[in-house]
Amino acid sequence: MRKPPSRPAATSRKRAPRQTAQFRDWTIVEPTLTPMLTPEQIAAELAAEEARTPRAPCRRRPPQRCKMGYGYYPASNQVVPSLRLRGRWLEQLGFAIGSTLRIEVRDGALVVRMAGEE
């Protein structure tokens, strides 16, 4: 069975009367203008900029350590060790993009060379 509402039904609600628009006084605030530099000041700043010691060019260093990663053979889910080398330092050493490499193992070390060098 349905319960009666706890609050009596409102007969009719009236809206609040609309307020008329009031005109407001606007105040315009302009920022203070910074004075322009004179040609002498510009020349002095440029001379000071050129007089500063230039920053040494950044040296790209090869990594000292890296971790052995892992990969998968496509035919099976067998995990295999993986080594990934990347960086501009390789290019500085002469390993260009697309060049053929020769990898040798000597005394427990990997030696990476260009394929044409012997």
Image (cartoon, grey):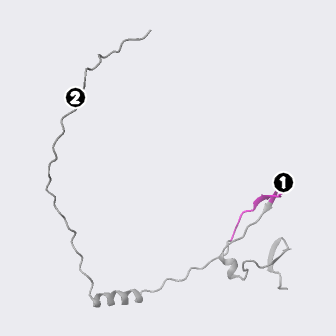
Residue 73 image position (x, y, % from top left):
83, 58
Under mark 1, the amino acid is: Gln
Crowd class of label 1 (few under 14; some 14 to 19; many from 20; radius 10 Å): few
Quadrant containing the N terminus is top left
Q: Helix, strand or loop at disc 2?
A: loop
User: How far apart are the alpha carbons under marks 1 and 2?
Assistant: 78 Å
Q: Quadrant of the C terminus?
A: bottom right
Q: Nearer the viewer, residue 39 or 65?
A: 39
Report the residue marked by disc 1.
78
Is residue 67 depicted above or below 98 in this figure? above
Q: Which residue is mark 2?
A: 14
Residue 91: x %, y % from top left: 69, 80
Q: x and y percent of residue 55 in the render?
A: 49, 82
Tell me the quarter of the picture where residue 106 sits. bottom right
Residue sitting at 29 percent across and 87 percent down?
Answer: 41
Q: Is residue 35 left or right of residue 68?
A: left
Q: Which residue is more in the foreground, 28 or 98?
A: 28
Q: Nearer the viewer, mark 1 or mark 2?
A: 2
**Side (left or right) of 58 relative to 17:** right
Quadrant of the rendered image containing residue 11: top left
Above or below — where is 9 with respect to 66? Answer: above
Is 93 in the magenta? no
Instruction: Compare marks 1 and 2 and give the one earlier in the sequence.
Output: 2
Q: Which residues are magenta?
A: 64-80
Task: Name which residue type carries label 2.
Answer: Lys
Helix, strand or loop status at disc 1:
loop
